[in-house]
Amino acid sequence: MKIAEALLELQENIEKAERAKKIILDGSYLYLLRKMKKEFEDTKEKYNSKVKLITSIKNEYATISKELKDLTTKIEKDENDLYNNSGSDIKAINALQNNIKNNKNKLKALEDKGIDLLEMEEKYKLEIELEKAELINLKNNFYSYKETTAKKIEDGKIELENINEKIEMLKNSIPANYLELFEGKLKEKKQAVAKISGGSCSGCKMKVSAMTMDKIAKKEEIVTCDNCGRILVKDDAIKLKEAK
Ligand SMILES: [Zn+2]
């Protein structure tokens, strides 16, 4: 049964190689990386637009400050004229008083607007601080995931190389006619070799004939299942081998 055991080992290594190939060729990590990149870019866009908003608020505030200064100057001038230069000219006094009143109202409105702008600036500044922290976080996650995935694929490649070496070694140790038989069966079914335990084949779950059991007992090189045709390996033999 040595050959049948080697064929089972070959089959197990072929399955292992398939699993390693799947890991190497798995494209889902690319999808995730793209998703993470998109999230980063969206957050960055939000961040940038808020930075722009803060700049425009600052510009607006500067304009208001200048207007406030101009208005204050105007009011001071009018007040000076009112107390020092208008004498008893009622018309001029009324006009000045009106101007002062109007300008004071404008001044109040501008001051309120200035306060609103400062409050808005504070709010956006807090928000961009949070977004900045999130950007750093997203960037770190992206690179750490990329690194982990690259390592997983690299490990998979090394593993596959080892498995392929093992497969070649096993193939070389098995006589060509048995190898052909094995490969032919592997094309038909997913598994060419099945274990036999308690007189049943693990491939088709059927009891094998007494004649087949007899062949196994006699340790013939290759014994196949009466029902499914798989090459049979005695489970006990494997257990003994693994225990060693
Ligand atoms: Zn079977």
Image (cartoon, rainbow, N blue to C red):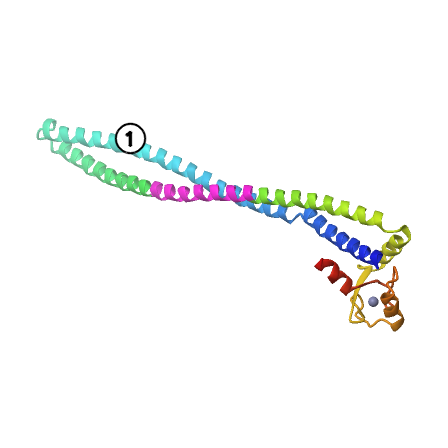
**Quadrant of the image where one finds ligand 1:** bottom right
Q: Is residue 179 above or below residue 127?
A: below
State the image coordinates of residue 141 (x, y, percent, origin top left).
Answer: 52, 44
State the image coordinates of residue 123 (x, y, percent, origin top left).
Answer: 36, 44
Give the structural element (helix, strand or loop) at label 1. Answer: helix
In the image, residue 122 lies in the stretch drawn in magenta: yes
Mark 1 is surrounded, within 10 Å at the Cα level, by few (under 14), some (14 to 19) or many (20 or more) other residues, namely: few
Residue beneath disc 1: 66
Q: Is residue 54 above or below residue 226?
A: above
Q: Is residue 240 left or right of residue 216?
A: left
Classify residue 54 by image quadrant.
Answer: top left
Q: Which residue corresponds to the image point at 43% horizontal and 40% vertical from the top-left? A: 50
| Most frequent secondary structure within the magenta stretch | helix
Task: Give the residue at the far top of this rendering.
Answer: 85
Q: Which residue corresponds to the image point at 25% horizontal and 31% vertical from the top-left? A: 69
The residue carrying mark 1 has its beta carbon less than 8 Å from ligand 1:
no
Instruction: State the extent of the magenta-drawn residues as a range.
Output: 120-144
In the image, residue 4 lies in the stretch drawn in magenta: no
